Amino acid sequence: MAAFRELGLAPWLVEQARQMGLSRPTPVQASCIPPILQGRDCLGCAKTGSGKTAAFVLPVLQVLSEDPYGIFCLVLTPTRELAYQIAEQFRVLGKPLGLKDCVVVGGLDMVAQALELSRKPHVVIATPGRLADHLRSSNTFSLKKLKFLVLDEADRLLEQGCADFTADLEVILEAVPARRQTLLFSATLTDTLNELKSLAMNRPFFWEAASEVRTVDELDQRYLLVPEAVKDAYLVHLIQTFQDEHEDWSIIIFTKTCKECQILNMMLRKFSFPSVALHSMMKQRQRFAALAKFKSSIFKILIATDVAARGLDIPTVQVVINHNTPGLPKIYIHRVGRTARAGRNGISITMVTQYDIHLVHAIEEEIKLKLQEFSVEEKLVLDILTHVNVTRRECEIELEYMDFDEKKEINKRKQMILEGKDPDLEEKRKAELAKIKKKNNKFREKVQQTLQEKKQLQMKRKLQKKMERRNKLRAKEEK
Ligand SMILES: Nc1ncnc2c1ncn2[C@@H]1O[C@H](COP(=O)(O)OP(=O)(O)OP(=O)(O)O)[C@@H](O)[C@H]1O
């Protein structure tokens, strides 16, 4: 493989990369850096932990160093934690340039951000929602001279779902110049490829790692078949075993909802495990603090929702446990990709209940690999079962006292206000929609019932006719 300097990078940048421990480029870097330096748009699809961040940070810094101004580059990313992580890479690699960066994410002071933006930082790293808010509400900065637009986790940014970025992206795309270089990266680009291609129109260079299997070889991927009711006992047993056998390992446990995340954290704490939670219902300051504690290995267990599924790069993570089987193979790929990064080994264990087997099949089909069973000594799980279940119940009751659901409702209403919607009106609309849905369902049920009755009547008549014919035949025979 070519060395960094053979890719066209300046010596100071090669030296800076070397100091960061990047001595030889990874395949995604070796393939994407030269076309980016040639001024082409780039779509890079490479496995988790393969160095996609440096694949865009290095060429952006190189071009910036030739003609430094602000705002030169905008990086969009789906989560706030990821924005800070990317900013750090820019800061470290761009140190000799005296790089000025600005992180623009939700949950933090908007005025301070607006002020920073007005000081024309070289690079802005933002989550789409907050940046769009700034664009809508102030004119203290301009993106009109931008040279680079980078979409990290690009497929997630274009996805329509619970956190839908499309409206915010529209605002941002209107604010950036048409003449720009667009760089799109993710470990899972393929199903949004056409939309992505429409964003990158400047002789786009598409690079995808040539590998049938979508996950890294260093990752040992297991599943654990567990009945729903005893899942937590298995989890406690797994953690205890890993902690006993590998004191220095860090573990991420992914959960389906914020509430589940919170309950599991409370429960693990009661078992004296050093755990912290990370989910979107926490205040931003708490989120950063939790992640910092986990990154510095003060707390070795992170329980998180999918807010931590993408991009986070924490080398000490040796184990990923999926407390629920992810509904989408793509989410599975990103979650388990939090371990076995940059050539290191790692293990993932996905808990599978009797209802999730089809999800595992879908995952296996997508990643082109069969998960292996993880064996557990069941007697040990049974020994702790009652204790774990009672502790969980205690935590659920405690959480009820903390008005978690109520807070969730308040957060939802706050979010609506921020999006310019009237929560009461939305509630009314939702109730009306539910009413219409109920009415439609009733109507559908009625139609179904009528059809069923008709069918039954027809069958009855047919049967009657058949009987009559048979009786007639029998009568004839008797004669
Ligand atoms: N050339 C290199 N040599 C050694 N290590 C590298 C190199 N490039 C990047 N790394 C390291 O690899 C790790 C993973 O890189 P990065 O976070 O960019 O991965 P990624 O491909 O963006 O993963 P994900 O899809 O999960 O976001 C980082 O710790 C980074 O410092």
Image (spheres, grey):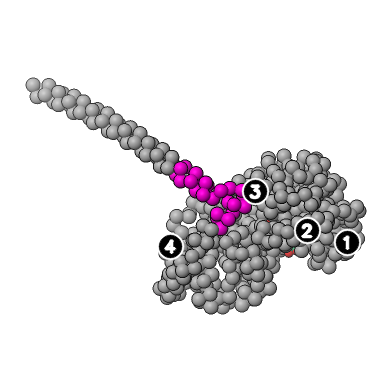
How many residues crowd mark 4 within 10 Å: few (<14), some (14–19), many (20+)? Answer: few
Between the residue at mark 3 and the residue at mark 4, the CA separation in whole angstroms equals 36 Å
Badge 2 element: helix
Q: Nearer the viewer, residue 337 or 108?
A: 108
Range of magenta residues:
411-434
Q: Are marks 1 and 3 in contact (CB under 8 Å)?
A: no
Q: Are marks 1 and 2 in contact (CB under 8 Å)?
A: no
Is the magenta region chiefly helix, strand or loop? helix
In front: label 4 or label 2: 2
Q: Is residue 275 above or below residue 164?
A: below
Query: What type is the residue that disc 3 sits on?
Result: Phe
Q: What residue is disc 2 on? A: 115
Q: Which residue corresponds to the image point at 63% horizontal and 68% vertical from the top-left?
A: 286
Marks 4 and 2, the one that precedes in the sequence: 2
Marks 3 and 4, the one that precedes in the sequence: 3
Q: What residue is disc 1 on? A: 97
Between the residue at mark 3 and the residue at mark 2, the CA separation in whole angstroms equals 24 Å
- Residue 199 visible? The answer is yes
Q: What residue is disc 3 on? A: 165
Between the residue at mark 4 and the residue at mark 2, the CA separation in whole angstroms equals 54 Å
Q: Is mark 4 within 8 Å of ligand 1?
A: no
Between the residue at mark 1 and the residue at mark 2, the CA separation in whole angstroms equals 22 Å
How many residues crowd mark 1 within 10 Å: few (<14), some (14–19), many (20+)? Answer: some
Q: What residue is disc 4 on? A: 227
Query: What type is the residue that disc 1 sits on?
Result: Leu
- Quarter of the image for residue 123 reads bottom right
